[in-house]
Every structure is written in structure tokens, then in C-alpha cells.
Amino acid sequence: MASKSFIQSLPKAELHLHLEGSVDPATVAELSRRYNTPLPTENNRYDVAGSGDVLTEDDVRRLYSYKDFNGFLMAFKSVTERLRSPEDYELVTYRLIALRFPRWMAIVVTVGASRRVRQPRWGRSGSSRT
Ligand SMILES: [Zn+2]
């Protein structure tokens, strides 16, 4: 039987990862300095309190050490409200790859709902196209 230390030393693969949940504290702090203004409130159905706060790296580490689901939601909100432009997503993606996957990575991006595609119609016998 393999020892625990041997198993822990084996390379691991991340099979499923959410980008917004993988932003390192230094990058969130950097984004919060970039966006030190609250999110606009018009047509916004969410609470944007704290969206313009400048967070230090230690603040983000405290946010990330949540103890319950509400804490997780607050940490997730703190990250997502600071991702405001395509360049921000570029930055967090680049940092994620550099910090956690320096050797290799395969990326599959899923954006929104899948598109409905019309299936070809087949004849009654199923042998001819119409
Ligand atoms: Zn998921």
C-alpha cells in the first residue's frame, strides 16, 4: 500500500475550477486599488455596499477564511465586484496560470447558456433527409 507521503507527493490535476473563486489575495488587493469607487447603483438589484473599499492583502485573506456559506458569498462578492473589465479577467487568468499552473494547463471556457441548434429533419423511414 502506498504511503500517505507518497500520495501527497504525486502531481495533482485541477479538474474543475471557477476563475472568480481562484483569484489570489494580492490580485484582489490590486484590483481594489484600481476600483476604489463603489459600483453604480442604477438598475442594480444587488447590495453594492463595500464595493469601493480598498482591501489590503490581509483583508482579502480574512475574507477568504470564511466559516460558513454567507462568508463564502461575501468573499465571492468582494472578488466579482472588482472584476469590471475584460482586462481584469485577463489579469486574473494570467495570474492564476502563473501561480498555480506554471507548467501546463488546458482551458475550457463556458460562457452563459448553450446555443440551441436546429437538428436536421429526417424522413419517416429515417433513411432520407428532407
Ligand atoms: Zn463549478
Image: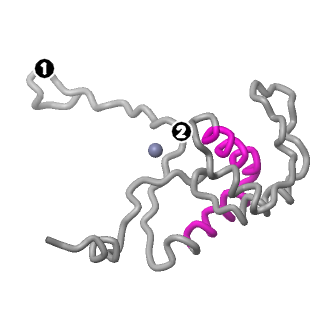
Q: Horizontally, is 14 left or right of 25 in the view?
A: left
For badge 2, the amino acid type reads Gly
| 27 or 87: nearer the viewer | 27
**Which quadrant of the view contains residue 72?**
top right
Secondary structure of the residue carrying numbered label 2: loop
Residue at position x 84%, y 35% in the image: 49
**How far from the left and from the top, in percent, is residue 106?**
42, 66
According to the picture, the residue beneath numbered tag 2 turns out to be 112
> What residue span does the magenta drawing correspond to?
71-97
Residue nearest the viewer, comparing 1 with 56: 1
Residue 73 drawn in magenta: yes
How crowded pointer 2 is (Cα within 10 Å; few <14, some 14-19, many 20+) is rated as few
Tell me the distance, in whole angstroms, between the alpha carbons under discs 2 and 1: 35 Å
**Of the residues shown, which amino acid type is indicated by label 1?**
Arg
Reading the image, the residue beneath label 1 is 124
Q: Position of residue 110 (x, y in %)?
A: 49, 47
**Splitting the image into 4 quarters, where does residue 97 fall?**
bottom right
Colour scheme shown: one colour
Quadrant in the picture for the C terminus: top left
User: Which residue is painted at 31% across and 75% down in the image?
Assistant: 5
